[in-house]
Image: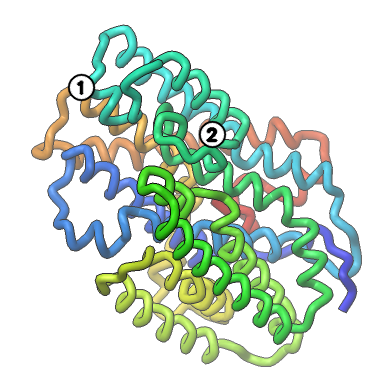
């Protein structure tokens, strides 16, 4: 198979877009519960692994979406347009979330709320140095590379995953070219080896590094999550090749969904000594591939327009929910009415998506061929997290 690659046309896989909302919601529910706004049982937090499993789902889906949209054996990707499209995809909302977080930070600093500064930002001493370093790291998409709580948590904590995405974007053209030259079997072997290396790496850092460093290296270090992105890319290439064969794969998709759903439930409900997301990586890959292989909706729930819109707005929800939650705490929301703050965050994410994220993406891409290839409205599966 030719290893040339480039943008390719494709239709939106609505079910995958909808699932993004549930993943972002799991993260938001975890944070809102930790802040005391929701009284969800500890079993729920264990089930979603504090939202970490949802981020892994995003990483696998990101690899699938990029490969699905950009692989083309007949043309070669224009790197400058690709990176411009990625910049337009993530940076405007990231900046908006940092502006929201800046108002929270100003309140903490000017009001001398040292208790909240420690609780929310893990900053006790050298306040301004830590805040400045953290802000630079978030603006430069380097947060995940710096395993320090006082760098990682301030401003907008969930933005650490964007540094992982930026790294994935950097290696994507090379990775796609390499995988496109492989057979399906060889891709599978490479992904399995990478997954085993990921597990060995996590075991090593949790065993040999100090506790205050090991968690960051196991959960947030970009290199740790590369196998998740790789599996998404490989699954998309398998999907493209399988669809090109002209053989009906609907039943195969249903089987993958059933097996992955049952296995994911078992893993999430288990008391594992290792991070749950490690065992969920291949299962998320199977679930995403299974949904893509469906030729018609089985239940149709994930294909509903309102749920698809929520999925399209999930990136905004993921990035703005924590600054909004902090402001809800400052405004006096408690466990009795905290759910109102969550509803507000979801509604706000839709407004941000339709009124800011989409227009800014169009403005950045205006006049380029990329703007036509990647419409901001989600007409294609260009909604990776």
Residue 10 position by quadrant: bottom right
Q: What residue is shown with label 1?
A: 331
Describe residue 76's horizontal placement relative to residue 345 as left or right.
right
Look at the image and tell me whether residue 248 can be seen: yes
Q: Nearer the viewer, residue 274 or 321?
A: 274
What residue is at 42 percent from the left and 65 percent from the top? 277
Q: Residue furthest front?
A: 208
Element under disc 2: helix
Residue 68 on image: x %, y %:
69, 65
Q: Nearer the viewer, residue 226 or 97?
A: 226
What residue is at 58 percent from the left and 80 percent from the top? 293
Describe residue 336's horizontal placement relative to residue 133 as left or right.
left
**What sort of colour scheme is used for the picture?**
rainbow
Residue 223 on image: x %, y %:
60, 54
Residue at mark 2 to residue at mark 1: CA–CA distance = 24 Å
**Residue 147, disc:** none
- The correct choice, above or below, for 119 with respect to 162 in the image is above
What residue is at 17 percent from the left and 57 percent from the top? 42
Q: What residue is shown with label 2?
A: 93
Element under disc 1: loop
Asked if the residue under mark 1 is in contact with the one under mark 2, i.e. CB atoms within 8 Å, the reply is no
- The correct choice, above or below, for 379 with respect to 339 in the image is below
Q: Residue furthest left?
A: 336
The mark nearer the N terminus, 2 or 1, is 2
Residue 314 on image: x %, y %:
45, 48
Which quadrant would the N terminus be assigned to in this image?
Answer: bottom right
């Amino acid at each position: 198979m030719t290893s040339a690659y480039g943008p390719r046309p494709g239709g939106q896989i609505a079910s995958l877009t909808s699932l993004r909302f549930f993943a972002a919601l799991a993260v938001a529910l975890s944070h809102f519960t930790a802040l005391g706004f929701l009284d969800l049982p500890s079993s729920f937090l264990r089930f979603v692994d504090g939202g970490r499993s949802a981020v892994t789902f995003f990483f696998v889906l990101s690899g699938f979406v990029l490969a699905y949209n950009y692989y083309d054996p007949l043309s070669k990707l224009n790197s400058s347009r690709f990176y411009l499209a990625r910049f337009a995809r993530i940076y405007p909302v990231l900046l908006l979330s940092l502006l929201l977080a800046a108002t929270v930070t100003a309140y903490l600093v000017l009001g001398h709320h040292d208790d909240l500064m420690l609780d929310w930002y893990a900053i006790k001493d050298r306040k301004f140095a830590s805040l400045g370093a953290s802000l630079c790291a978030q603006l430069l998409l380097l947060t995940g590379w710096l395993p320090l709580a006082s760098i990682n948590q301030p401003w907008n904590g969930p933005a650490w995953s964007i540094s992982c995405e930026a790294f994935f974007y950097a290696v994507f053209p090379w990775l796609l070219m390499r995988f496109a030259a492989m057979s399906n079997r060889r891709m599978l072997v490479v992904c399995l080896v990478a997954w085993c290396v990921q597990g060995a790496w996590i075991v090593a850092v949790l065993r040999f590094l100090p506790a205050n460093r090991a968690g960051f290296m196991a959960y947030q270090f970009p290199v740790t999550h590369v196998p998740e992105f790789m599996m998404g890319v490989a699954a998309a290439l398998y999907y493209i090749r399988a669809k090109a064969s002209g053989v009906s794969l609907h039943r195969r998709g249903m089987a993958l969904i059933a097996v992955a759903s049952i296995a994911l439930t078992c893993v999430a409900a288990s008391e594992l000594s290792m991070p749950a997301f490690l065992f969920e990586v291949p299962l998320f890959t199977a679930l995403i591939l299974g949904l893509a292989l469906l030729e018609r909706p089985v239940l149709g729930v994930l294909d509903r327009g309102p749920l698809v819109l929520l999925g399209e707005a999930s990136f905004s929800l993921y990035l703005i929910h924590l600054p909004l939650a902090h402001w809800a705490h400052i405004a006096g929301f408690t466990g009795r009415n905290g759910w109102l703050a969550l509803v507000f965050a979801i509604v706000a994410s839709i407004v941000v998506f339709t009124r800011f994220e989409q227009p800014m993406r169009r403005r950045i891409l205006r006049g380029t061929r990329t703007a036509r290839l990647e419409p901001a409205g989600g007409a294609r599966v260009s909604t990776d997290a």
